Structures are given as structure tokens and as C-alpha cells.
Image (cartoon, rainbow, N blue to C red):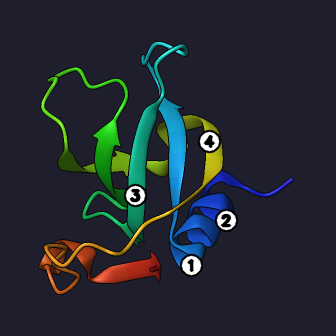
Amino acid sequence: MPTTQNQLCQAITSKLTISFTKNGDPEDDPRIGEPHLVFVSTRGKAQVAVFQTAGYSSSGQLPQWRNFDVETISLLTILNIAFIPRTDFNRQHPMYAQVICG
């Protein structure tokens, strides 16, 4: 069975939208987003940079860029919905110094 990180990298490579929940989210309202990069955060955790377009949001502010700890992601599904990588994604940001995939 592929790991969550491997599935995220597959979705990024294929430019496919994902559906997922993270710890504490309601399972009946998954987050929907466009994954752009998996990286190691300054805390040493694998994170994914996602442009979240729909689904659960504790702030209610969507669409919006979000970084999620990979270890907190569950119920991950790669959707058959392609996306075009966003031009406002700054891959050169120092936060993304240690890229895993993307």
C-alpha cells in the first residue's frame, strides 16, 4: 500500500486534485485542493503545500494556500480532476529549501 507521502507525490507529478481530511476534521466534509510540493519544514516534518479550493476549513477562508503536516493527513484520495499549477506559488521561498517532491 502506498504511503501518504507517495500518494501526494503521485498527485503532484500527475497534477491531479486531492481530497483528504486531517486530524480533527469532520470526515463527511473532506478538504479539496491542488497539491504543489512536499517538503521538509523547519521543524523537520514532511509537509505538503496545497491550494485548498473547497471542503472543510476551520477559518472558512477559501480558496487559500495551506501547508499540512503529511502525518496528519487521512482519507486521502487522488481525484480524476486535473489542475494547472498556480503561477502565484513561490517555489523559491526559503520555507521550501528541502524539497521531497514537486
Could you say which disc has been placed on residue 35 in the image? Answer: none
Q: Secondary structure at mark 3?
A: strand
The residue singled out by tag 3 in the image is 34
Between discs 1 and 4, the one toward the N terminus:
1
Write the residue at 64% across / 70% down: 10
Kindly check if marks 1 and 3 are in contact, taking CB atoms under 8 A apart as contact: no
Which element carries disc 2, helix, strand or loop? helix
Label 3 neighbourhood size at 10 Å, few (<14), some (14-19), many (20+)?
many
Determine the residue positioned at 23% across, 82% down. 91
Q: Position of residue 51 (x, y in %)?
A: 28, 55
Query: Could you tell me how far apart the alpha carbons at marks 4 and 2 are, in whole angstroms?
Result: 11 Å
Q: Is residue 91 above or below residue 70?
A: below
**Among the 4 quarters of the image, the one containing residue 61:** top left
User: Pointer 2 and pointer 3: residues touching (CB < 8 Å)?
Assistant: no
Specify the quadrant of the image occupied by residue 98.
bottom left
Q: Determine the secondary structure under disc 4.
A: strand
Which residue is identified by label 1?
Answer: 13
User: How many neighbours does mark 4 have within 10 angstroms: few (below 14), some (14-19), or many (20 or more)?
Assistant: some
Query: Alpha-carbon distance for marks 2 and 1?
Result: 10 Å
